[in-house]
Amino acid sequence: MEIKYIIENSKKMLDKKVEVSGWIRNHRPQKEFGFIDFSDGTCFKHLQIVYDNTLKNFNDVAKLLVGSSIKVTGTLVKSSGNQEFEIKANDIEILNRCPEDYPIQAKRHTKEFLRENAYLRPRTNMFQAVFRIRSLAAQAIHKYFGENGYVYVNTPIITASDCEGAGEMFQVTTLDLEKIAKSGKVDYSKDFFGKLTGLTVSGQLEAETFALAFSKVYTFGPTFRAENSNTKTHMAEFWMIEPEIAFCDLDDLMNIEEEMLKYVIKYCLDNAYDELEFLDKFVENGLIKKLEKVINSKFTRVTHEEVIKILKESKEKFEFEPEYGEDIAKEHEKYITEYFDGPVFIYNWPKDIKAFYMKQNADGKTVGAVDLELPGVGELIGGSQREENYEKLINRMKELNMNPDDMYWYVNLRKYGSCIHSGFGLGFERLVMYLTGMENIRDVIPYYRTPGNCEF
Ligand code: 4AD
Ligand code: MG
C-alpha cells in the first residue's frame, strides 16, 4: 500500500488495517514505545508510525537508525500529536538496517554537501520536491503538446550537423586517438560513420523536416554542448523541448510559448502544492505567489533595440556596456526582467549574433528571433521564425562560410513546399529552476555534467 493512497483516502482508511514499506526519515525511540517519521516517496508527506513494547522485536526496532528500510503492518488511527493520523504498528519487519555512517541524517544539509552525495539526495525533502516537480513539468509539456495536436518526434542524438554553428559539439568517434597521435593525421573516412560526427546541440533542423510534413511537431530530448562555461545556468548535458510549427510567424510563436509556459506552471500548482509550499518556505520565499502571478499576467514584448535603449538610459553601472547590434549580458537580462517585473520576450535581434537559419527582416540588420527572459533564470527560451526563402538562406550560409551542400536536406525544404514556419528551444532545467526556486542548475538534474565533472 502506498502512503499517497492512505493520505488521500484517510477518512475511508481510518481504523483499517494498513501495510506499508519504506524508509525511516527520523526516529525517536523511548523506553516503552517509539515514533518513526516514515516515507515511501510516493507523495511529499510522511506518515508517523507509533509502536510500543508489545512488538515482538521491540528491542531491535528501537535500535533502528535513520535510512533503514522497514515493512510495517498496523492500523491507521487518529493521532494525538501534530498530525491528523498515524499508523499504530502491530508488526515491523526490518528489511535493512542502515549503519551510523549514513550521510543523510534528519537535519538540514547544505546543497553543496548534497551535490557531493548526489546519489543519496533524492531522499531529502528538498530533492523529493525538486524531482517530483521536474517529473510533473515534463508530463505537463507532453500533455500540452498532445492536447494541441502536436506530433512528438525523436530527433537523432548522433548527428553530422552543428545546428547552432557555435562549434560546441562533442565529437563522436571510434578512431583510436593514441594511434592518430603517433601517425600525426586523421582520416575521418575511416571513422565509424565515415565522416566527422558529434552529439546533437539541437534537434531543430531535423524537427523542421517533420514540421513541413505534420505542421506541428515537438522534440523533448537530451542535448549536449561542449561549452567551457561554469555558470549556474549552463551544463554540458541538458534537456531541451523544441516545437516546430508550420504556417506560424514570430507573433504566433510568442503566443504559443506564453500559453505553454502558463499551462505547465498551472499544472505544477495543481499537482504539486505540497512540494511548492515546502520550496516556498525553505528555498524561495514568495515562490507560489510568483508562479500564480505569472499565469495571470501578460508577458512583456520588446525589441532588442528597445532593450538596449532602456539599458543605456538606466542609471545602473553595468560591468559590460550595453550596445546596439550586440548580445546582452547576464546582468542586462537581470535588469530587464526586474524592470518589467516578470517574463520578457525580446525579439528582432541583430543578425550578426544569431544563427544562420533565422528569418532575415526587411531592415537588413535584424532577424526574426525571440528570446524569453525570466527573472532569476535569464534566458529560458530561444526561438525564431525560420528563413523560408531558398536564395536568402543559401546566401546567408555562404556569408558564414557554410557549405549548403553539406545540409542539402535542410535547404531543400525551401525548395520542396516551403512555407513560413517557426520554432523554439526551451531549456528544461532552467524551467525547473524557475518552478522550484533552485538557484543552481546542478540541483535540478539528477547527475550533472559540467567541465571537469562526470561523477556517478
Ligand atoms: O538558444 P539556444 O541555443 O537555441 C537553439 O538551440 C535553437 N536551435 C532552438 C530552436 O529554435 N529549436 O538554446 C535553447 C535553450 C536556451 O534558451 C536555454 O534555455 C537552453 O536551451 N540552453 C541550455 N541549458 C543548459 N545548459 C546549457 N549549456 C544550455 N544551452 C542552452
Ligand atoms: Mg539562445
Image (cartoon, grey):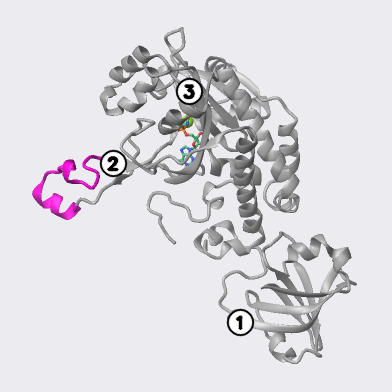
Real-space CA distance between mark 1 and mark 2, rounded to the nearest whole angstrom: 49 Å
Tell me if residue 337 can be seen. Answer: no
The disc, 2 or 3, on the residue closer to the chain's N-terminal end is: 2
Q: What element carries label 1?
A: loop
Callout 3 crowding tier (Cα within 10 Å): few <14, some 14–19, many ≥20: few
Callout 2 crowding tier (Cα within 10 Å): few <14, some 14–19, many ≥20: many
Q: Position of residue 321 (x, y in %)?
A: 48, 23
Q: Is mark 2 on a helix, strand or loop?
A: strand
The residue that mark 2 highlights is: 197
Nearer the observer, 41 or 409: 409
Q: Which residue is drawn at 63% across and 77% down?
A: 68
Nearer the viewer's eye, disc 2 or disc 3? 2
Q: Does the residue labelled 2 lie within 8 Å of ligand 1?
A: no
Furthest-top residue in this view: 363
Q: Which residue is drawn at 73% across and 28% down?
A: 297
Q: What's the amino acid at mark 2?
A: Thr
Whether residue 185 is in magenta: the answer is yes
Q: Which residue is drawn at 60% across and 20% down?
A: 252
Question: Which stretch appears magenta?
Answer: 176-197
